[in-house]
């Protein structure tokens, strides 16, 4: 299937083995007029993530790790396929998070071959094919994988056991480290990139060479098309149950859809959040890009499960630290950047 | 010849290829929202073109919407303008609306 939308994070749908990508406004017009799009075939990259994930490490950490490894422009011009045992072991929600952030390393989009996890997720859902039509579609879907000797323009191999809970310290998603790591010292950065690097740290109010763990945060945002699915909310609820947020922190939980919101209420997740001092809000893009009223005030630090930490993204002069829902939830409780592994 | 997952899907959707240039790719599903779609509707209107296959489009308002008191549209007048502009367009009468 091919899917487009005037939103770069359309790549999320690649989790289902679709070619899905964001387009510009003039292209939106082209598709409305013709149901077709003029496109050059991108180069193809495969990223293999093999091995087991450590406790407290989730799909968001995988993708933040990959982007930190290859940089925010490391996949420019490519369409990425994610493969390997660590990817296969993820739920559909986890796969969506991975594909969602493909574009944060410059890729046109990202995709994962459909398998039993995909088929089980789709079966019986509204809009899914039924009866004989399901069987026909399923037979076709089972042909959607890269053949054994298929050629990729580039392949990258990642060892899942090297991945820690991740956090970003800078102003692009590639500026991330493991939670026990440190913000690179100036001399660890390529000389010609040092001015931009120091400018980013100045915007963030952070010191080169410093540890990121222990940094005080003001806001926690759990939401966006990257991490606002029911699984994310369940994960956060299971961790915060019986805990209370730090006094100085404002916590916004924004479900990704009405369906997720209703499911969360049905499961009593809203009560868990309320008891912890979190606010469960109504669905929308919200503080991911601050196009509505949900803006982070200037100078404040927000640990956010969204996808971009650009200058001003969450509000003028707001400072964004990207992390997984678990790491964000840990910060909500302690009031600072925390290694979730010490709390679970 | 062995193919990648991407190539299997891409090849089935190519309508025409321009020699040494891009391809015309068929799009199965087009998602639209209130921020980047109004200009596209305006463009179609100016050129007198209708939406070719409205059944392939799903529209959602999500980028600008408030996350409290969503039933009180007057609370977010500034955000409501593009939402109304895009979703009250006559071209959209047969586009499937979707809850957020």
Image: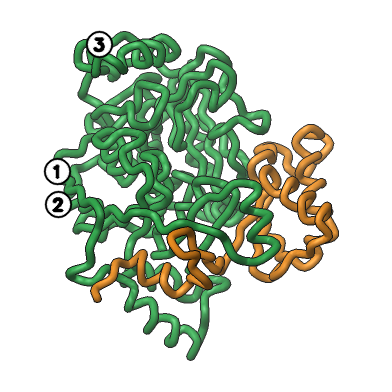
Q: Is residue A263 visible?
A: yes
Q: Find disc 2 in the rendering and name its residue.
A: A51
As drawn, A130 above or below A269:
below
How many residues crowd mark 3 within 10 Å: few (<14), some (14–19), many (20+)? some
Chain coloured orange in the rendered structure: B
Residues at badges 3 and 2 in contact (C-beta under 8 Å)?
A: no
How many residues crowd mark 1 within 10 Å: few (<14), some (14–19), many (20+)? some
As drawn, A228 above or below A203:
below
Measured in 3D between alpha carbons, the distance from the residue under mark 3 to the one under mark 2, in whole angstroms, is 33 Å
x and y, in percent, of residue A61 in the image: 30, 39
* Residue at figure coordinates x 33%, y 31% from the top left: A174
Q: Chain of mark 2?
A: A
Q: Chain of mark 3?
A: A
Say what secondary structure mark 1 lies in.
helix
x and y, in percent, of residue A146 in the image: 27, 68
Identify the image quadrant of residue B35.
top right
Q: Earlier in the sequence, mark 3 or mark 2?
A: 2
Q: Earlier in the sequence, mark 1 or mark 3?
A: 1
Say what secondary structure mark 3 lies in.
helix
As drawn, A306 above or below A80:
above
Q: Chain of mark 1?
A: A
Say what secondary structure mark 2 lies in.
loop
Identify the image quadrant of residue A4.
bottom right
Q: Find disc 3 in the rendering and name its residue.
A: A186
Q: Find disc 1 in the rendering and name its residue.
A: A161
Chain A pictured colour: green
């Amino acid at each position: 299937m091919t899917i487009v939308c005037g939103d770069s994070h359309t790549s999320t749908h690649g989790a289902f083995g679709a070619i899905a990508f964001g387009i510009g406004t003039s292209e939106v017009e082209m598709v409305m007029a013709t149901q077709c799009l003029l496109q050059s075939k991108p180069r193809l990259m495969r990223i293999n993530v093999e091995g087991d994930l450590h406790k407290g490490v989730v799909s968001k950490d995988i993708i933040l790790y990959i982007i930190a490894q290859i940089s925010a422009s490391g996949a420019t011009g490519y369409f990425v396929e994610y493969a390997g045992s660590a990817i296969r072991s993820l739920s559909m929600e986890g796969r969506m998070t991975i594909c969602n952030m493909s574009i944060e390393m410059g890729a046109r989009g990202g995709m994962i071959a459909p398998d039993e996890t995909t088929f089980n997720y789709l079966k019986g859902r509204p809009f899914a094919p039924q009866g004989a039509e399901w069987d026909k579609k399923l037979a076709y879907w089972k042909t959607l994988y890269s053949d054994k000797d298929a050629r990729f323009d580039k392949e990258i191999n990642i060892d899942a056991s090297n991945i820690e809970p991740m956090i970003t310290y800078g102003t692009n998603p590639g500026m991330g480290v493991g939670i026990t790591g440190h913000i690179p010292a100036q001399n660890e950065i390529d000389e010609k990139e040092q001015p931009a690097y120091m400018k980013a740290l100045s915007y963030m109010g952070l010191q080169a060479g410093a540890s990121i763990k222990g940094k005080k945060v003001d806001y926690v945002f759990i939401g966006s098309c990257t991490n606002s699915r029911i699984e994310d909310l369940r994960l956060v609820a299971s961790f915060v149950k019986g805990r209370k947020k730090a006094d100085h922190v404002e916590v916004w939980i924004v479900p990704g859809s009405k369906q997720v919101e209703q499911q969360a209420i049905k499961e009593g997740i809203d009560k868990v959040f309320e008891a912890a001092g979190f606010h469960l809000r109504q669905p929308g893009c919200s503080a991911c890009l601050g196009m509505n009223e949900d803006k982070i005030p200037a100078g404040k630090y927000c640990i956010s499960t969204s996808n971009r930490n650009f200058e001003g993204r969450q509000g003028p002069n707001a400072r964004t630290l990207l992390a997984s829902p678990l790491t964000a939830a840990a910060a909500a409780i302690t009031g600072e950047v925390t290694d979730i592994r010490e709390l679970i | 010849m062995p193919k990648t997952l991407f190539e299997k899907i891409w090849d089935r959707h190519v309508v025409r290829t321009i020699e040494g240039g891009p391809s015309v790719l068929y799009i199965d599903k087009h998602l639209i929202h209130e921020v980047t779609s109004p200009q596209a509707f305006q463009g179609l209107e100016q050129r007198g073109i209708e939406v070719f296959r409205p059944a392939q489009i799903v529209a959602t308002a999500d980028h600008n919407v408030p996350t409290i008191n969503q039933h009180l549209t007057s609370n977010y007048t500034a955000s409501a303008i593009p939402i109304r502009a895009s979703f009250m367009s006559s071209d959209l009468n047969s586009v499937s609306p979707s809850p957020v």
